[in-house]
Amino acid sequence: MDVTSETRLDGNAAAGILSELFVPDLTTARATCIGCGANRPLGALMVYASGMGTVMRCPTCDAVLLRIARMPTRLCLDLTGAKLIVVGT
Amino acid sequence: MNDGSVSAAPRTAAIVWQLATVVDVIMETPTARTIILDVPHWPGHRAGQHVDVRLTAEDGYQAQRSYSIASAPQDPRIALTIERLDAGEVSPYLTEVLAIGDRLELRGPIGGYFVWDAAREGPLLLVAGGSGIVPLMAMLRHRAAALEHADMPARHKVPARLLYSSRAWDDTIYRDELARLMAGDDALDVMLTFTREPPLRWTGFRRRIDRMMLAEVAWPPAERPHVFVCGPTPFVEVAASALVELGHDPALVKTERFGPTGGSV
């Protein structure tokens, strides 16, 4: 097992930082991966987190769906890898 | 697609940092302590959710960690059970220094994905490694409170099994409460496995959780149990892949990895 896999968390671990950006809980929203088209709740994505930010990857193809960078006075969100995010049923 | 999500009213207000007051502390094991908190504006939580805790040093340096809620939603006070990590930046303070009357900055409840509601019928399978028991204990406490006055047929609509791996008997968090819960409920089974020092004359499992153990403990995949796995990252990955190999629907196997520092984001 490599170092990266030891630090891997679930999408649920990003719920706090996501709550700084979105009012509805995004971990139950479904996201479509731009890499492979897999569709699953954000809570089921893989999270790689550090002090500088959070990266959420597809467990199927490892593509990056979402990046959040934390800087002293702002948060930056990159959603390029999430083709569609659906909140609600 | 049925992913087993619990429906709940969408959150309509932002989650904000607030000050909680420590009203009690309970030593659970030599390294784990439960902190009972009074949170003035607590909106209520669901079993499996967590809070973010933020500590600020005098020089302004901040450290933030996520901790699972151990108490049932029915309990007005919030319980967090925290395992001390030897090289930890936050957990030694929370487990050794923080005292009754102290205040703590937190935000929550957070995360609607790794949650279980007793209104959802069907078997509940919980797989815990070490302090991964904490959010699963919230589910068992929630189930016990919801079924407090239920008859046997009602209990058997939500049967539950817990497979809990710890190093030794002394490291087993909530062991007395688990025994009590199981004694009073024939639809609940608690199975322990010890990876280092099993108690004397222990006849149960004495190894790390593996596929064979899960096959023995879990309901058949055709019964579609709701599965929650929580523990250190390598533990969760072994258990979750074994369950999927055994035929469980990946959408019904929800995981919460702790990572090296207890899930800080």
Image (tube, coloured by chain):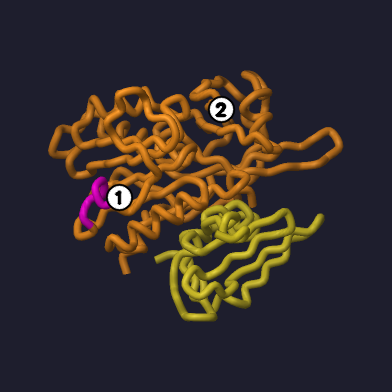
Chain colours: A yellow, B orange
Q: Describe the element under mark 2 as helix, strand or loop.
A: loop
Looking at the rendered structure, the number of numbered marks drawn on it comes to 2
Task: Identify the chain of the residue marked 1, using the numbered disc in the image.
Answer: B
- The residue that mark 2 highlights is B31
- Work out which residue is located at the far left of the displayed protein and give it: B153
Q: Check if residue B219 falls in the magenta segment.
A: yes
- Amino acid type assigned to the residue bearing label 2 in the image: Thr
Magenta residues?
B214-220
Q: Earlier in the sequence, mark 2 or mark 1?
A: 2
| Residue B110 % position (x, y) | 54, 48
- Label ID, residue B214: 1
Q: Residues within 10 Å of mark 2 (few under 14, many from 20)?
A: some
Q: Residue at x 47, y 80 (%)?
A: A37
* Residues tagged by mark 2 and mark 1 found on one chain of the structure: yes
| Residue B68 % position (x, y) | 51, 41
| Residue A75 % position (x, y) | 73, 61
Q: Describe the element under mark 1 as helix, strand or loop.
A: helix
The quadrant holding residue B149 is: top left
Q: Residue at x 29, y 51 (%)?
A: B212
With B126 as the anchor, is B129 left or right in this view? Answer: right
Q: Image quadrant for the N terminus of chain A?
A: bottom right
- Amino acid type assigned to the residue bearing label 1 in the image: Leu
Q: Residue at x 30, y 43 (%)?
A: B118
Q: Residue at x 59, y 44 (%)?
A: B262
